[in-house]
Amino acid sequence: MSTTTQANRISITTPLPGPKAAAYIARDEAVTSRVLGRVFPLVPESGRGCWITDVDGNTFLDLFAGIAVCATGHCHPAVVKAVEEQARRLIHAGGADVYSPGYAELCEQLVAIAPAGSYSDGWEVFLTNSGTESVEGALKLARYFTGRQRVIAFRGGFHGRTAGSLSLTASKSVQRRGFGPLLAGVEHLAFPNRDDCPAEVDESVWGRQQAERQFHAIFETTTPPEEVAAIVAEPIQGEGGYIVPPAGFFPAIRELCDRHGILFIADEVQTGFGRTGKWFAIEHWDVQPDIICMAKGISSGVPVGGFMARKSVATWSEGAHGSTWGGTPIGCAAARATIRVIEEEGLMENAMAQGEWLMARFRELAQETPRLVAVRGMGLMIGLETADKATAKAWMQGCFERGVLTLTAGAKSLRLAPPLILSRNEAEIGFGVMRDVLLALD
Ligand SMILES: Cc1ncc(COP(=O)(O)O)c(C=O)c1O
């Protein structure tokens, strides 16, 4: 079989998986945990920019970037150089044991890009190795600072898979089945979608109502607000289907938090680092969180995470939290280079420009086929809701076979989270393939 796409760099020259990939997959499945749910029979060997080449020499356009991880693309030369140089100098210096210049420099960069809001107490940063660890640390700090235990999160939200963060995660029951009881005192409310705002109603009024009605109801019936340590939310739900909340929703939550001494934790693990056109997506609503969780796009693929807390909130005592590898020198080098590249190459502006172009094309496509029912997102975080789950799966599979990598999200959506370096030409290639595949399903 040969389905080489001409006039671009997609090149599929073997059946998928190809013979070498099939051999690796057989070896892999004999020894790796069955819990790993791989999306594609893909065995990548190399990557550059928005492109991945597998072990059989097939080249794919990567429109999900390891789920919003490779912000600067695969193997950006500046990130590779920073990692190589650091590996030659020093590989390990425990951030919880000794002072490490690279650790402090990264934290300085993070504080410099943190949302400037109405609080003037500044930020301090704790570095981790992953998103879930960032959420765990943020939860611990919120409980420590407030002396309260209850936490409120949202249905459709995803915050990780370790015990604390899994207690907040509410996107698919398979992620929770068999693991209870989880943390006590966690409640989930509905996360509104701005597309559901009635046309005749002001979105920010409606958004406020969506927050206030739900919180007032639980505060008056089940959940005394003075027992709530934190409200945790993704500014745009990721795993839940790239759901953008209405204007007014987060400002109302911020006010409720201030009124009741509750901390607002923004989980920016998927939305952060320029993906939505701002360093942090919560900035779109001009709201300052008390704690911000980070990972994924922070470091272009080298494991790094972290959370920033307002200084007046980070009151915990020395030794109350720690991590052997959090803020490893190589991770910090990759993250510093990533932040520099996002800034110097204007990647936030590019994310906005390419994202708007792509969403406009997909909205036109939605006029052509009932299989595409909604297009939503911000910047290069694009959700494409289809008519049903089978369509979403068939669309993703068809794109894979044609050399374009996408991913399902929520109940029946595809998501696009390509590298922020995506060019217009690459956006056109990706859209062209996706369009052809979707229309061919009809
Ligand atoms: C919003 C959000 N929070 C937390 C996590 C967990 O991150 P990790 O897989 O690095 O533990 C994810 C992962 O997808 C995420 O999207």
Image: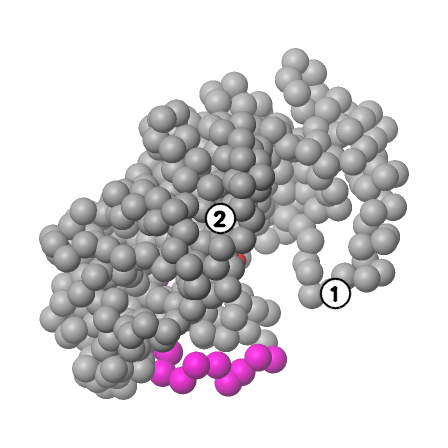
SS for callout 2: helix
Specify the amino acid type for callout 1.
Arg
**In the rendered view of the protein, which quadrant contains the C terminus?**
top right
When the figure is inspected, residue 165 is found, relative to residue 295, above or below; the finding is below
- What range of the chain is rendered magenta? 178-193
Residue 294 coordinates in the image, percent (x, y) = 40, 53
Percent of width and height locating residue 75: 57, 33
Task: Give the vertical position of 3 relative to 19 (above or below).
Answer: above
Q: Nearer the viewer, residue 248 or 280?
A: 280
Query: Label 2 is placed on what type of residue?
Result: Pro
Residue 191 on the magenta segment: yes
Does 17 sit left or right of 369 as displayed? right
Mark 1 is surrounded, within 10 Å at the Cα level, by few (under 14), some (14 to 19) or many (20 or more) other residues, namely few
- Taking the spot 38% from the left edge, 33% from the top edge, the residue there is 340
Instruction: Report the predominant secondary structure element of the magenta stretch.
Output: loop
Q: Is mark 2 within 8 Å of ligand 1?
A: no
Q: Which mark is residue 329?
A: 2
Please name the residue shown 80% across and 26% down the image: 13
Where disc 1 sits, the SS reads: loop
Q: In the picture provided, is 164 more to the left or to the right than 407?
A: left
Q: State the mark number for residue 407.
A: none
Residue under the image location 45 percent in, 33 percent down: 420
Percent position of residue 112, x then y: 25, 43
Q: Which residue is mark 1?
A: 34
Mark nearest the camera among 2 and 1 is 2
**Marks 2 & 1, CB-CB < 8 Å contact:** no
Q: What's the CA distance linking mark 2 and mark 1? A: 32 Å
Q: Is residue 108 visible?
A: yes
